[in-house]
Amino acid sequence: MTLTIDDVMNPAARGRSLSRRAEEMPASPIRKLAPLAELAKARGTRVYHLNIGQPDIETPACMRDRLKTLESTVLEYSPSSGTPEFIRSLQSYYERRLGMQLAAGQILATTGGSEAILFSFMAVCDQGDDIMVVEPFYANYRAFAAMAGCNIVPVVSRGRDGFHLPPRELWERALTPRTKAVILCNPGNPTGTVYNREELDDIANFCREHGLFLISDEVYREFVYDGRKAISALEIEGAEEFVIVVDSLSKRYSACGIRLGALVTRNGELYDACLRMAQGRLSPPGLAQFIAIGAESLGDDYTRGVVEEYQRRRDVLFEGLTSIPGVFLQKPEGAFYCIAKLPVEDAEDFAVWLLTDFSHEGATVMLAPANGFYVSPLGKSEVRIAYVLKEEDLRTSIQLLRVALEQYRLK
Amino acid sequence: MTLTIDDVMNPAARGRSLSRRAEEMPASPIRKLAPLAELAKARGTRVYHLNIGQPDIETPACMRDRLKTLESTVLEYSPSSGTPEFIRSLQSYYERRLGMQLAAGQILATTGGSEAILFSFMAVCDQGDDIMVVEPFYANYRAFAAMAGCNIVPVVSRGRDGFHLPPRELWERALTPRTKAVILCNPGNPTGTVYNREELDDIANFCREHGLFLISDEVYREFVYDGRKAISALEIEGAEEFVIVVDSLSKRYSACGIRLGALVTRNGELYDACLRMAQGRLSPPGLAQFIAIGAESLGDDYTRGVVEEYQRRRDVLFEGLTSIPGVFLQKPEGAFYCIAKLPVEDAEDFAVWLLTDFSHEGATVMLAPANGFYVSPLGKSEVRIAYVLKEEDLRTSIQLLRVALEQYRLK
């Protein structure tokens, strides 16, 4: 903190400092290089964003068109749990998608999946409690853990295993007296891994045996490839009391900016606790809830079209990246990310260099260094790549990366 | 938690419980009676809502009309700090309203004022730290304190003093080694009190001397009556390093449902910490930011019209309530609330009875029991009343309250 004259004149004031939590709050590995990207753009360099899961797929017209039909003259608070219409729309979605009837009191509308994660962490953890997570993991879990004052305890998955769930013994070993929950992301960000039924049953059994909650982040539920099926933790039998599902409309309908998601649980006490937090912040976003109504009737045709598009992009990315010497990755099974190992010592240095020193034919690429997706000192030469750009841009990005890696090696 | 067969079969699982934080999270005193109101409505009773600050004033047409002009086909994430256009619109507003030039890096767009409060608490407090607050206070501060793991330390203000700031000695007495900040709401929810310059200078001096942050919740800035002026904590000289302003568009433009606000601070380190939290949740709501652009050009005419309307309502309410035997309140100076003392022993019991047992000519009123606005065992016979209904409805509500209090007395 910069000292002012007032502070210096007054010794007591010099004691003013931010919380340790604030100091420890990590910068987003996905966004922290954004200022460098802005500078590159200001120099006239075109930046291809492989760093962020912001799809270029259109938000469905039915959602955008609803904006033109809004008749309310007062943009009012909605109920803290979401408007009845929006909750009904989610009920229809779960019924169609998972063949499951959920009660209105089991679905809490949230400000994006983000808020559902925060509420989950706060509902199950006190200061100093532990949450187990498969590493590498979605970087912002760290931010929410820092906010909630709990610790992320990693259980390492390996690229050579396709980042599938680590064996039971590693889970048992990482368990502490303060472990309260396991959080999974399935399909996985940043790995693109899709857990099968056996894996989910195993982890549910682990949670059951040790009295843990299972927080299942399923915001990429629609995006599975090669005929795979994403299994929701809601489908695990006998896990009703300890499963908390984090859901979001951001990716499902390519509507990241509206900030609308849901927390789903059949544990009534947990729902009530989250509802009280929701009351504290009054309402989830109203315009988002308004335009979401009707989206549930976008059926399998819509999803199939989008998934085919992403699968094509995945194929382009996988073929392109594996053809670059020294780059290693597993073929992603779902979501729209992969973790790629690059032939560099420090992928963050490389990602910075791409934005500050490199351009080829007036363009460069932005990557998310994977170290932010680990708490262990791993992943130093890895990056997370989001394949949310259209094929042509993806091909150009891969070509740029190829040229950049050659130049960087000779540097 | 309801035990399932699985839990009973497995002793370890019985240890699964929610966090203490979750258990301690208070239900909103403003919203917890909502289910009773729904039941009353289902019985055909009209419920006049004096419990919630949801104005019936129209959201400005320029904001609603912008929805029809949205051309983006992808509803994308915005920058975590807000879109440049929205931040510029806030800069214009502060320049016009406070005559103050703020840099873009001093204004963080938030999901309502609510999120600005949460970020403030988390940025300055660790688990077990204290925040001082003038009691009675906005009830949801308790919820955010519970989320942040910090304690609300009340400094009691008195109705007979118009709920103005308590004398310095009470502040000194309430100070602890773990006090990190003072939070003020000015103009005040739930009191309607507007602090004058001397009071603000006093409290700023107190914060300066003791190395505290001053969190100033100014979401009712526009609403001051009888020619008063709301002074922003941003205007206090020499307080740049420790003032954090919580702002919101909810009340200013009668757009509570869009969930858009801002955290304003000239402490760069604090801004950065809040930005890292903001990155964790990705973006503030995008549609809200889009429609907010242009609202800053609604000038003094717009505000004057709205303020005149509220002042008329305040007068109707004040005259009406003070004419009811046994009801006491100070004339509110700003915002659109008052704390009224009722001739009942327990105002919560009365508020429940109004919804469950009372109706007059097919209608009843909903009140917010004031006990939720205190942590001290005070305010038991008080309620918070929001005068956000149009005059005619307010008059009817007051009449209903008069009849109800008579019936309740005879009960």
Image (tube, coloured by chain):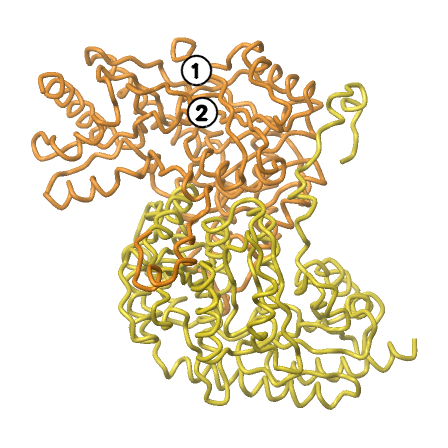
Chain colours: A orange, B yellow
In the foreground, B327 or A223: B327
Q: Position of residue A140 (x, y in %)?
A: 43, 35
Look at the image and tell me whether residue A153 can be seen.
Answer: yes
Is residue A169 rendered to the left or right of residue B11?
Answer: left
The label shown at residue A271 is none
Circle 1: residue type: Phe
On the rendered structure, is B303 left or right of A340? right
Q: Chain of mark 1?
A: A
- Graded by Cα atoms within 10 Å as few (under 14), some (14 to 19) or many (20 or more), the crowding at tag 2 reads many
Residue A317 percent across, percent down from the top left: 27, 21
Q: In this picture, is B96 found above or below B86?
A: below
Question: Residue drawn at (50%, 78%), measured in percent from left and top?
Answer: B195
Q: Is disc 2 placed on a helix, strand or loop? A: loop
Residue B122 percent coordinates (x, y): 49, 49
Q: CA distance from mark 2 to mark 1?
A: 9 Å
Q: Residue furthest left?
A: A361
Residue A299 position (above or below residue A257)? above
Sequence-earlier tag: 2 or 1: 1
Image mark 2: chain: A
The x, y position of residue B310, in whole percent, is 53, 82
> Which mark is drawn over residue A163?
1
Residue at the image point whose x is 32% and y is 61% from the top = B69
**Tag 2: residue type?**
Gly
Q: Nearer the viewer, residue B244 or A193?
A: B244
B120 or A196, nearer to the observer? B120
Q: Are marks 2 and 1 in contact (CB under 8 Å)?
A: yes
Q: Which residue is mark 2?
A: A188
Q: Quadrant of the C terminus of chain A?
A: top left
Q: Secondary structure at mark 1?
A: loop
Task: Kindly indicate the quadrant of the structure image that contains residue B95.
Answer: bottom left
